[in-house]
Structure formats: structure tokens, C-alpha cells
Amino acid sequence: MKIVIVVPAFNESRVIFEVLKSLPKGLKGVSDIDVVVIDDGSLDQTAKEAEKAGVNVIRHSINRGLGAAIKTGLSWAKKQNADIVVTFDADGQHDPGDIAKLIKPIILKKADLVIGSRFLNKQPIPIDRLLLNWFANFATFILYGVSSSDSQSGMRAFSKKAIDLVDFKADRMEFSSEILLEAKRNNLKTTEVPIKAIYTKYSRNKGQRNLNAIPVLMRFLVKLLR
């Protein structure tokens, strides 16, 4: 079984090398693991640091958005004939040890899409992330009729069936909700597993993700008001 880990990245040169080096080299029941970084128009040395880590790197010439980066990664994984695709954030907020838990339902053929949820277990979560997640989950349910405890999670696993069928259009962060809609449309078996959330001073102070949340909320509000 072949796994591709897709790491979307934008201006993450300070941490991405260590993040990539922390990813597992082997997993039970897995014969091959490939890692691909989608450098989404970074203005720093993100691509160079990723190349130094010895992984595959695809570069967008301009910043197209998180959804566009994930689409590029899924397309690359399909060409590699991946059995499972895992998405993993580049800023260090995920625990690589959770990947084995994330892919297990797919290996056991119990799920096609697995969402790593930061909210299934009690753990320290910044209040702004709690509020943003609550609103995103509410909007996802109202707009798409899909319930999730962590609709905006950056850590997911897709089966081969899901890789072939999921066809989301959004290029920005709201693509996370659209993936859940696509899973519903295609009758994909979806489940959630608890994951650890790691909030460092770097990820909290970086600002890019918090700024992204504002237009995401605005786009959700526009859809809700239509």
C-alpha cells in the first residue's frame, strides 16, 4: 500500500525542514511513503528548505490558496497511484504520530475519508480557534447538511476511491467544508479520529492563518445570507 503525504506550505521556511524530518519513514501495513510539498507562491526559502529535507516539491508561481495547493497535491498523488493521501500542515501544529491512527480506518476499509479532529478529546485550544471552528462547523452544517466536530482540520486521509471522486472547487480555506459536501454527494464513508493540536509561539504569531480566517468567515456569511 502506497501513501502520499501532501504538505501545503506558504512562507514556512523557519519550521518546514523540521516538520518534514519528523514525518514517519514507515508505517504498519504500508510499503511506500512519498512526501510532496506544495509551495504555494512562498516569498521566502520554503521550497529550498523542503528540497533540503529530500522530499518532492511542486511550486505555484503565485499564492493561489490552501485549497488550490491541496488540489495540486491530490493530482500529483493520483499520478503516483497512491492508495491513501494524507494532508499535513507545514507549521508544526500536527503530531506526526497521529498519521498511523488517521489511516487505520482506510486500511481496515471502514472509511474513505478520515478527518483528524482536534475537538474529540479535551486539550488546550486557543479561544479564537474554538470560536472560529464553532462558526465554521455551524456554517458547514447549514449550507451543506454535513456535521463535523472539526470541519476545518488540516489533517485528513483520503482513500483511493475518495481521491478519484472528490472534486472541490474552492481555492481558499473554505475548501475544507466543500470536501465534506463532496464526500456526502459521492456516498463516501466518513469518520473522525482524535488528533493532538500543537499550538506553538510560531504558529500563533505567524498571523497568516488568522488573517485567512476573516475572508473565509465573510464568504461563509455571504453564502448563508443568499
Image (spheres, grey):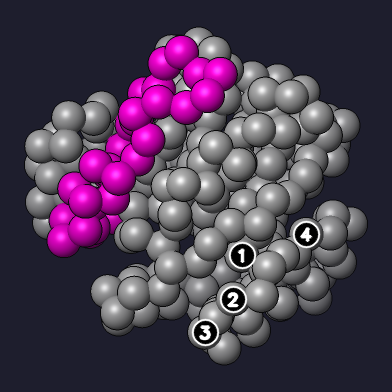
Q: Earlier in the sequence, mark 3 or mark 1?
A: 1
> Residue tagged by mark 4?
148
Quarter holding the C terminus? bottom right
**Residue 18 belongs to the span the image colors magenta:** yes
Q: Is residue 174 above or below residue 215?
A: above
Residue at 51% x, 74% y is 213
Instruction: Identify which amino acid the numbered label 4 is placed on.
Output: Ser
Q: Are marks 1 and 2 in contact (CB under 8 Å)?
A: yes
Image coords of residue 81 (percent x, y)? 50, 11
Instruction: Identify which amino acid the numbered label 2 is placed on.
Output: Gln
Image-quadrant location for residue 10: bottom left
> Residue tagged by mark 3?
126
Instruction: Identify which amino acid the numbered label 3 is placed on.
Output: Pro
Quarter holding the N terminus? top right
Q: Are marks 3 and 1 in contact (CB under 8 Å)?
A: no
Image coords of residue 68 (percent x, y)? 46, 43
Image coords of residue 180 (percent x, y)? 74, 47
Q: Which region shows up in magenta?
A: 10-39
Q: Earlier in the sequence, mark 1 or mark 4?
A: 1
Of marks 2 and 3, the one in the foreground: 2
Q: Which mark is residue 118?
A: 1
Q: Is residue 102 or residue 168 the one in the foreground? A: 102
